[in-house]
Amino acid sequence: MSKELCYVIDQISREKGISRDILIEALRSALLSATRKRFGGRTNIDLLIDPDTCKIVAFETKKIVSKVSDKNEEISIEDARQFSSDTAEGNAVNIPLNLHDFSRIAAQTAKQIIFQKVREAERDVIYNEFKDKVGQIISGMIMRREKGAYFLNLGKTEAVLPVKETIPNETLKRGDTIRAYIEDVKLTPKGPSIIVSRTMPQFVAALFKMEVPEINDGLVIIKDIVREPGERTKLTVYSNNSSIDPVGACVGMKGTRVQSIVRELRGERIDIIPWTDDPRQLIARALSPAAVDRIGINEEAKTAMVIVNDQQLSLAIGKKGQNVRLAMKLTGWDIDILSDTEYSKIRMEEADRTFQDTIKKDPVKKDIPSVDG
């Protein structure tokens, strides 16, 4: 019996990834509960399992007395001599119990408790495995869609990908293998709940960490990243090592690294910007792919006026203001964009107002003869 029990414990431990000690303690707890139930719920009954041989020993502990008043809790000195040489009155003695006559109910109770303990241990193992993976990327296969979410098969468990956390306009089908960002891991009464996302900016950052060894090794650092899922991502990168080109490292030879990420993001555009502490340069780079002519800034208000060529205006602003909106999020500056024509018109209007104000203050200047005069 002991050999078979050890074999079963070892097998469950390997298959479920549960510690052998946890399984032995679960079995001990289950058998103890069944044994106490078999003997009327007495609490002076205990049970031990040898962790090496899996031998099970059950016993009841009774107090040695000269006169027995409760046979379930006490034992006479004469009877105690069968189990111990130390039979002094007031001492306790352990009396072995026979486990072979468990009733069907007791055996069923033991089985239920073992299953419950195994389920609890499985949940703990899965939770402990994934709680430290928050902020990392996992791969999973789409199993089904229900109640506004996709369920990904991760092997031992499932992850939940809410539909709102999928990239806009992407269609996921059963059997598709995708990557996602672990946003949160919670322990619920039904087991661990693993929530993943494909829309968070951190998902793109984690993809770069996977694809770019220099980022993974800390040689290239992502300073900031902003994103409108399915449309465009902007990120600033830098390196403390002057021999490393942070943008080139992210792009890869012939664009292989960044293109791999673009494919995962279903064609989303990515602007990789070298970070600088010069706000003018940073704003100009953040408005990529548009070219900037001039920039004026107000450092106290953190506002900037950007002048671009007329042909670059729509590119700088972007579709529905997307490019400038992302640039503002990335830099933390409030940016106004004007074309050369608009800027020249404003300057002319300002000059005209200045001239008119001067005339009002000094009417004599109205009579100044012209050059032709």
Image: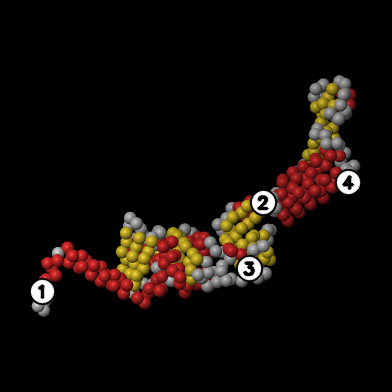
Residue type indicated by callout 1: Pro
Question: CB under 8 Å between callouts 2 and 4?
Answer: no
For disc 1, the neighbor class at 10 Å (few under 14, some 14 to 19, many from 20) is: few
Can you see residue 193? yes
Image-based side of 269 in relation to 25, left or right? left
Residue 115 in the image: above or below residue 60: below
Q: Residue 131: percent from the left, percent from the top?
A: 60, 52
Near mark 4 (Cα within 10 A), the count class, few <14, some 14-19 or many ≥20, is few
- The answer to which quarter of the image holds residue 159 is bottom right
Q: Amino acid at mark 4?
A: Arg
Residue depicted at x 50% and y 70%: 231
**Residue 86 percent location from the top left of the image:** 82, 25
Q: Earlier in the sequence, mark 1 or mark 4?
A: 4
Q: Is residue 214 visible?
A: no
Task: Give the mark nearer the N terminus: 2 vs 4.
Answer: 4
| Quadrant the C terminus occupies | bottom left
Mark toward the start of the polypeptide (1 vs 3): 3
User: Whole-Å distance between the Cαs marked 3 and 4?
Assistant: 47 Å
How far apart, in angstroms, are the residues tagged by discs 3 and 2? Answer: 26 Å
Q: Earlier in the sequence, mark 3 or mark 4?
A: 4
Residue 369, disc: 1
Q: Label 2: which residue?
A: 188
Q: Nearer the viewer, residue 211 or 105?
A: 105
Q: Secondary structure at mark 3?
A: strand
Q: Secondary structure at mark 4?
A: helix
Secondary structure at badge 2 equals: strand
Residue 269: x and y in percent read: 48, 71
Give the class, few, some or many, for how many residues have Cα within 10 Å of label 2's Cα (few <14, many ≥20). Answer: few
Q: Which residue is mark 3?
A: 177
C-alpha separation, residue under disc 2 versus residue under disc 4: 33 Å
